[in-house]
Image (spheres, grey):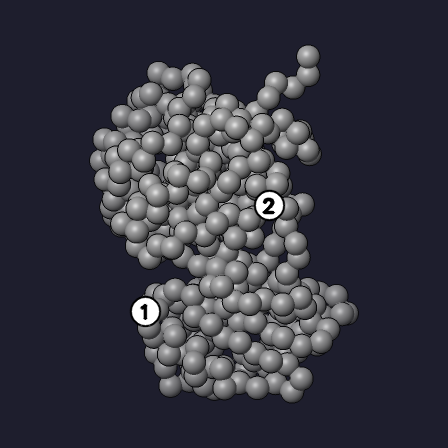
Amino acid sequence: MRGGLIESLSTGGGGSILMAVMDGLGDLPGEPLGGRTPLEAAVTPNLDELARRSALGQHIPVSQGVTPGSGPAHLSIFGYDPVEHFVGRGILSALGIGFPILPGDLAARANFCTMDSSRMVTDRRAGRITTAKNAELCARLRSISIPGIEIFVEPEKEHRACVVFRGEGLSDAVSDTDPGHAGAGRLEPRALVPEAVRAAAAVSEFLAKSDELLSDEHPANGMLLRGFATMRPFPSVGSRFRIRAAAAAIYPMYRGVASLVGMEVLVCSDLRGQLEAVRAAKNGHDFVFFHFKPTDSSGEDGDYEAKVAALESFDSALPALASCGYDVICITGDHSTPCSMKLHSWHPVPVLLSGGPQRTGWSRRFTERECASGALGTFPGTDLMPLMLASAGRLEKYGA
């Protein structure tokens, strides 16, 4: 997306847009499903019916072969170059829980994890402990003190937490301690520039003390920290694209990235609440982001049947979303999370675009194969926002 072009063409008028993001949507054919992807195996009559009167395609979140984190992937589909506008996961976690982040604070995303007697990570998510247990453990870790540095440990959801270090001279150029997969030892935090030596030492001391306090716990007997970041200002979607935007998301990280780009974060705590928030937001907003997490969680767990069930659950909710009256509906994912990999991947992400003047009638179902041959083709994730805006009649013609 050429810098400044879409902003200069945005009219501030036109139709309303609903972007529904099934996190980790894309997948690969799997033997457990007879060589089909979860999307192909799922019974999704509502998605398929909508696909037949929509334009399909696939987006690439960052670049060919590049596996994106959730933050960069969402920034991309919100119309931000995820390289130019990179932000660490820690800030998104802090914003997502409403933590009062201050200039100079160093924030990190934390996972409670399971470690064996040799300190090897056996489960990066500690069996997805309950949020209540998470809160109990965070309260225990708040007793950790480091001279000259104030530490905040706050629960997010399930195994996820946020750790904020507050003190003078804390650089965010610190390497992650999460190895990224089970069967490996936790990594030591390293200063990536000389100015980050103090921050890396503080992180190392925090982890050592947290190990002591969690030693009698199971499965959450360790912590992994990643996405170290300090706060910097971001241009809002409102100022860039002249839209009044809102977000209906349950998980703090996604509320955080929406907040970062200036979306109003709507109050909701479950799927029913999200649907109600999306319907109410039609009055007063031009653009609403709806986030659906179970497709990603099941992919990370390698659970094909659970991902099929998650897709079918979304399909059941689709009539309620469609009935909210938005002029344009986009259904996509932020990235792919193949069950066979149990990780995010670089594979293109399915896209469905309904409403406005579309090339329809090319597709029969909403699947990876159908999207790969769809009318929209394969395009950068940053082009999704212009496609939605144009479909809603919110972009002027360029030139005479």
Q: Is 63 left, or right, of 331 in this rendering?
A: right
Residue, x 39% and y 38% (percent of image)?
282
Mark 2 crowd level (few <14, some 14–19, many ≥20, 10 Å Cα): some
Alpha carbons under labels 2 and 1: distance apart = 34 Å
Q: Position of residue 355 (x, y in %)?
A: 40, 24
Residue, x 67% and y 74% (percent of image)?
199
Q: Position of residue 375 (x, y in %)?
A: 44, 20
The amino acid at mark 1 is Thr
Outermost residue on the right side: it is 194
Check the image and report above or below for 228 versus 4.
below
Q: Is 332 left, or right, of 76 in this rendering?
A: left
**Helix or strand or loop: what does disc 1 sit on?**
loop
Check the image and report above or below for 331 versus 227.
above
Outermost residue on the front side: it is 284
Q: Quadrant of the N terminus?
A: top right
Closer-to-camera residue (141/224)? 141
Q: Which residue is mark 1?
A: 130
Q: Quadrant of the C terminus?
A: top right
Mark 1 crowd level (few <14, some 14–19, many ≥20, 10 Å Cα): few
Please tell me the numbered disc located at residue 399: none
Q: Which residue is mark 2?
A: 236
Residue, x 40% and y 28% (percent of image)?
327
Displayed quadrant of residue 365: top left
